[in-house]
Image: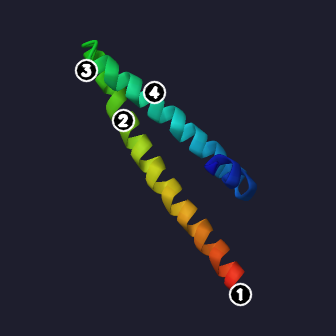
Amino acid sequence: FALVKLRRVRATLTLLCAGLFALTAIQTVIGYLITVAGQVGWIGLHVPLAFVVFGLTAWLSAKGAAIARATRDSRAA
């Protein structure tokens, strides 16, 4: 639902949200490989990817809030 609604407003944000979903899934798989399968060699990718996921999440949240605020303000005017 969110992707359909967002696609109408900002196509770029929609793609970034889909990318964030994919990165989060990859992060989860790498975490599984480290903890359950004992493949500690993945830590070198897992940690930097966590920073990317965190940063992208914060940026998308801020951008989404700004769009929602602008939409709300334009409706009120």
Q: Which residue is mark 3?
A: 35
* In the image: residue 28, left or right of residue 13: left
Q: Which residue is mark 2?
A: 48
In terms of depth relative to the viewer, which is nearer, 52 or 62? 62
Q: Which mark is in front, 3 or 2?
A: 3
Q: Which residue is mark 4?
A: 26
Distance from the alpha carbon under mark 3 to that under mark 4: 14 Å
Q: How is the image coloured?
A: rainbow
SS at circle 2? helix
Q: Earlier in the sequence, mark 2 or mark 1?
A: 2
SS at circle 4? helix
Q: Which residue is mark 1?
A: 77
The residue type indicated by label 1 comes to Ala
The residue type indicated by label 3 comes to Thr
In terms of depth relative to the viewer, which is nearer, 18 or 47? 18
Task: Find residue 60 and report its horizontal and vertical position in percent.
Answer: 52, 54
Residue at 28 percent across and 12 percent down: it is: 37
SS at circle 1? loop
Label 2 crowd bin: few (<14), some (14–19), many (20+), radius 10 Å:
few
Distance from the alpha carbon under mark 4 to that under mark 1: 43 Å
SS at circle 3? helix
The residue type indicated by label 4 comes to Ile
